[in-house]
Image: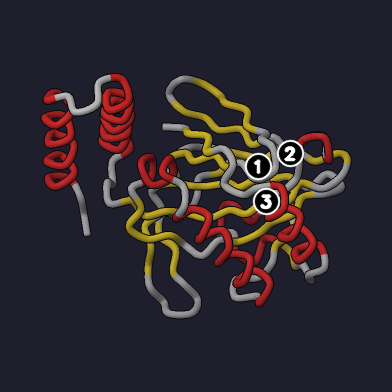
Amino acid sequence: MLIVVPDVLNSTEVTQMRAALDAADWVDGRVTAGYQAQSVKENMQLPEGHPVATKQGELVLAALARSPLFMSAALPLRVFPPMFNRYTGGGHFGTHVDTAIRALSSTGQRIRTDISATLFLASPEEYDGGELLIEDTYGLHSVKLSAGQMVLYPSTSLHRVTPVTRGARVASFFWIQSMIRNDGDRTLLYDLDTAIQQLAKDAPGSDTGVKLTGVYHNLLRRWAEM
């Protein structure tokens, strides 16, 4: 399931975050790449644990907590602390699959990467190229969103970032371990939740809505891993 989450950050939040990030010291992005990804990755990153990354990551996490769409689509159990990258001057990331298990450098806690997230922090007109290309069973999807918008997609997907030939592509990226491991099960629950919410608007107090809500929670109870 590929989901676009609009307005995770407003324009003021994006501007303030960009100011902090643009003034920070960036390093070669290959420091966090797995063995296979190192050969196809060319970008800059803020190191995990960098004070600017930590502070801005906390703001991203607070914004996610305010997003009903994120909560419904991801059903998060754990979220890897948001990281930040920058692509310029032909920077790109070739086709790869994200590492299945990531460990927090601060605690060693392991997180299974069920869902990958990219939160765009540069507007499309600021740079040329830099499209996020995601492959799934329905084909190839090209994603280049407005600043403050985010895309969620299964971490099992092959994906890549095309070369940035003008300007700078700045984004936050991170992973989610969902309470629901299987993407197909998450999709069913998301579709059911969306239908229940629409029914609540169209027919408030409907007995059908109550029954469907019960089905949703019973499925969640059956499938959730805690």
Give whichever of 106, 120 is nearer the camera.
120
* Residue at screen point 77% across, 50% down: 87
Hey, what amino acid is under mark 3?
Ala
Give whichever of 70, 79 is nearer the camera.
70
Q: What residue is shown with label 2?
A: 130
Give whichever of 154, 42 is nearer the camera.
154
Q: Please tell me whether mark 3 or mark 1 is closer to you in this view.
A: 3
Q: Which mark is residue 50?
A: none
Image quadrant in which you'd find residue 7: top right
Left or right for 200, reference 125: left
Q: Is residue 150 above or below residue 174?
A: above
First along the sequence among labels 3 and 2: 2
Hey, what amino acid is under mark 2?
Gly
Real-space CA distance between mark 3 and mark 2, rounded to the nearest whole angstrom = 11 Å
Give whichever of 61, 203 is nearer the camera.
203
Q: What residue is shown with label 1?
A: 94
Real-space CA distance between mark 1 and mark 2, rounded to the nearest whole angstrom = 11 Å
Q: Is residue 32 above or below residue 163?
A: below
Left or right for 71, reference 51: left
Hey, what amino acid is under mark 1?
Gly
Real-space CA distance between mark 3 and mark 1, rounded to the nearest whole angstrom = 17 Å
SS at circle 2:
loop
Left or right for 99, reference 190: right
Q: Which mark is residue 171?
A: 3
First along the sequence among labels 1 and 2: 1
* Residue at screen point 49% across, 53% down: 64
SS at circle 1:
strand
Left or right for 207, reference 183: left
* Residue at screen point 56% across, 58% down: 60
